[in-house]
């Protein structure tokens, strides 16, 4: 159709994993465990839910477009000013605003080839030339990314830790990389899985840096368990944030989303339990997968490397038909890989049972 630009016609949309209801219908199963989307298996904070329910009386009113309470709280926690904080519909919502705000004409983007698929969709949809740099042993190749910087480079996207590999780059690697990035180039540093890195001494917590050309993105969708509310937040220089605030949708996130995120920041016990559950679950899954080739992960998921796409496809199919939803990573460009999220103890036990059944030849 002539009305649709060529780069949109050629765009491959993001295809999410199967839902629990879809698997139930397809395989006529009663018990389903979803370990495909890196969600918090403990659910949202009960305190956050109560706070939302107790404050729904004004739902006929538009949300606070400035999101003063939530942005102020985030600024206080991270020793910033409110003008350094931006919110969006998940971190992807902020990525979209960043693209619309800063890219134009002959600008170019640089990112890793098989990193977060959500950013790849946004980059391809922008119509802006993107230089996709291959990963090195499932890690970001920061040297190669830096070597691709040219006069037209405007945005570099980094996910640390990465999804779907679960790998990360350390402080010295990040420092060396930033020395090679011109101030005119904006670095998007996506830290969606930051909360799971608390025991990594060499993790480059972006809040300990103050680069004027870096926007840090984090989310309430993972460790805070608010994926259904869609709340992401970003930190950056006032001039960058001011620009984003001019472009972003005026009433985003929604009122319930702002309430849930605000209250969840006070539930430190819930966050601690989440990290503990993840640590124990990760070890259980790794033990069960000791005969598989897995990528070392610092997140809330494990990615298995199979010899080929057929093996990955068969593994995913067997798991689905037995009530375990995992994520085949063909859509990410990793055709021989499957990603498994850490679940509750019961979820993980069920996965181990199905895996044992598979390993014994059904």
Image: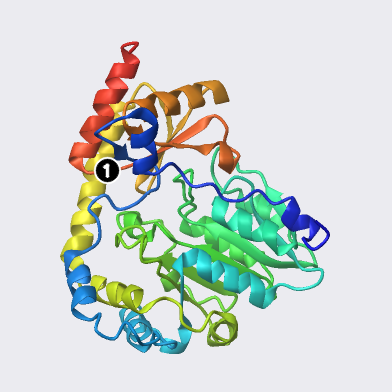
Q: Position of residue 307 (x, y in %)?
A: 53, 22
- Residue in the foreground of this view, choosing between 139 and 288: 288
- Residue in the foreground of this view, choosing between 167 and 336: 336
Q: Quadrant of residue 303?
A: top left
Q: Position of residue 175 (x, y in %)?
A: 54, 63
Q: Please name the residue that numbered disc 1 is placed on.
A: 343
The residue drawn where x is 59% and y is 68% is 96
Tell how many labels: 1
Rendered position, 280 above or below 235: above
Which part of the image, by quadrant, shows the N terminus?
Answer: bottom right
Q: Where is residue 173 in the image (x, y as percent from the top left)?
A: 54, 55
Q: Is mark 1 on a helix, strand or loop?
A: loop
- Residue in the foreground of this view, choosing between 116 and 246: 246
The residue drawn where x is 21% and y is 42% is 280
Mark yes or no: residue 267 visible. Answer: no
Q: In this view, does 309 lie to the left or right of 51?
A: right
Which part of the image, by quadrant, shows the C terminus?
Answer: top left
The residue drawn where x is 48% and y is 56% is 160
Rendered position, 276 above or below 260: above
- Colour scheme of this structure image? rainbow
Q: In this view, does 225 lie to the left or right of 309?
A: left
Rendered position, 102 above or below 299: below
- Residue in the foreground of this view, choosing between 212 and 177: 212
Mark yes or no: residue 63 visible. Answer: yes
The residue drawn where x is 29% and y is 38% is 33
Say few, some or many: other residues with alpha carbon within 10 Å of mark 1 (under 14 / 14 to 19 / 20 or more): many
Q: Where is residue 196 in the image (x, y as percent from the top left)?
A: 33, 55
């Amino acid at each position: 159709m002539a009305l649709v630009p060529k780069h949109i016609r050629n765009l491959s949309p993001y295809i999410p994993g199967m839902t629990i209801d879809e698997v139930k219908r397809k395989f006529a199963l009663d018990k389903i465990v979803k370990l495909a989307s890196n969600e918090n298996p403990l659910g949202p904070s009960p305190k956050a839910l109560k706070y939302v329910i107790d404050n729904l009386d004004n739902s006929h009113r538009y949300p606070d477009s400035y999101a003063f309470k939530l942005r102020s709280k985030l600024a206080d926690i991270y020793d910033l000013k409110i003008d350094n904080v931006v919110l969006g519909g998940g971190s992807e919502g902020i990525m979209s605003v960043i693209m619309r705000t800063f890219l134009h004409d002959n600008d170019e983007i640089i990112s890793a080839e098989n990193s977060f698929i959500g950013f790849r969709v946004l980059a391809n949809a922008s119509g802006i030339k993107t230089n996709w740099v291959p990963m090195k042993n499932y890690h970001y190749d920061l040297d190669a990314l830096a070597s691709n910087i040219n006069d037209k480079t405007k945005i570099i996207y980094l996910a640390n830790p990465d999804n779907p590999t679960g790998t990360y780059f350390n402080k010295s690697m990040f420092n060396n990389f930033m020395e090679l990035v011109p101030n005119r180039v904006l670095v998007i540093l996506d830290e969606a899985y930051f909360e799971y890195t608390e025991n990594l001494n060499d993790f480059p917590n972006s809040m300990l840096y103050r680069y004027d050309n870096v926007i840090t993105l984090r989310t309430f969708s993972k460790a805070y368990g608010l994926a259904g509310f869609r709340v992401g937040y970003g930190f950056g220089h006032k001039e960058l944030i001011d620009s984003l605030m001019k472009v972003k949708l005026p009433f985003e996130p929604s009122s319930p989303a702002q309430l849930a995120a605000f209250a969840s920041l006070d539930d430190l016990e819930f966050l601690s339990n989440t990290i503990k559950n993840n640590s124990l679950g990760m070890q259980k899954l790794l033990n069960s997968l000791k005969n598989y080739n897995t990528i070392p992960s610092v997140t809330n998921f494990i990615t298995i490397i199979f010899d080929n796409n057929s093996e990955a496809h068969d593994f995913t199919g067997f798991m689905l038909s037995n009530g375990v939803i995992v994520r085949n990573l063909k859509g990410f460009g990793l055709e021989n890989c499957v990603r498994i999220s850490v679940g509750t103890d019961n979820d993980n036990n069920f996965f181990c049972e199905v895996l044992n059944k598979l390993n014994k030849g059904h």
